[in-house]
Image (cartoon, rainbow, N blue to C red):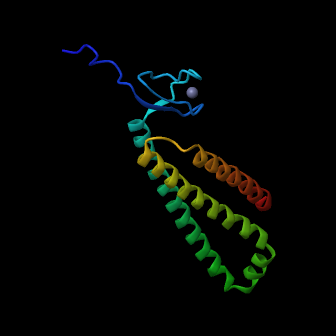
Amino acid sequence: MNNLQFTEQAEFRQCFKCHYEAVTAQTVCPRCNKTAFFTASSIRKRGAVVIVVGLFLAGLMGVIAIVVGMLLLGQVKDPASAQRMADDQLTFLAIFGLFGLLIALGLQFVVTGGWMAAFGRRSRVLIRIMWGFLFLVFLVGGVVMALVN
Ligand SMILES: [Zn+2]
């Protein structure tokens, strides 16, 4: 009988903090000492969760954008509110820009999660793109808040 049965197997692991990669049985990253040192199968499961979150975000924002768009179309028929909307074009542009960005962020989650599920590792480039989208979401969100107030 082998007595290694209950110890961790040496396998590919990737650190989500410092991106260190190695084939090892260690559960703590040897470079940054974080416990975010995940095996390929663990990264695949996390990828599946990221896909679900991304689909939910893109779907939810898509539905909200359609509902708000239909409400606005209804208001265009009334000349008074149509004039007010014409004066607030920048606000509507910013609001729909934010919806578009959140849908794009959701789809970006699907791509990032899909990559993790397919390859069992996280793509550094996709994570950077995700942070870029998040930055834009907060930027445009701030513009919307400023315009609405
Ligand atoms: Zn690390």
Q: Can you tell which quarter of the image residue 93 is in?
A: bottom right
Which image quarter is the C terminus in? bottom right
Residue lying at the far left of the rendered structure: 1
**Lateral position of residue 72 relative to residue 14, left or right:** right
Count of numbered circles on the image: 0
- Left of 109 or right of it: where is 133? right
Comparing 117 with 80, the one in front is 117
- Image quadrant containing the N terminus: top left
Quarter location, residue 24: top left
Query: Vertical placement of 68 versus 7: above or below?
Result: below
Measuring 74% from the left and 86% from the top, which residue is drawn there?
A: 79
Q: Image height check: is 90 above or below 46?
A: below
2 sits to left or right of 83: left
Ligand 1 image-quadrant field: top right
Residue 118: horizontal and vertical position, in percent? Answer: 42, 49
x then y, percent, for residue 85: 75, 76
Q: Residue at x 57, y 34 (%)?
A: 19
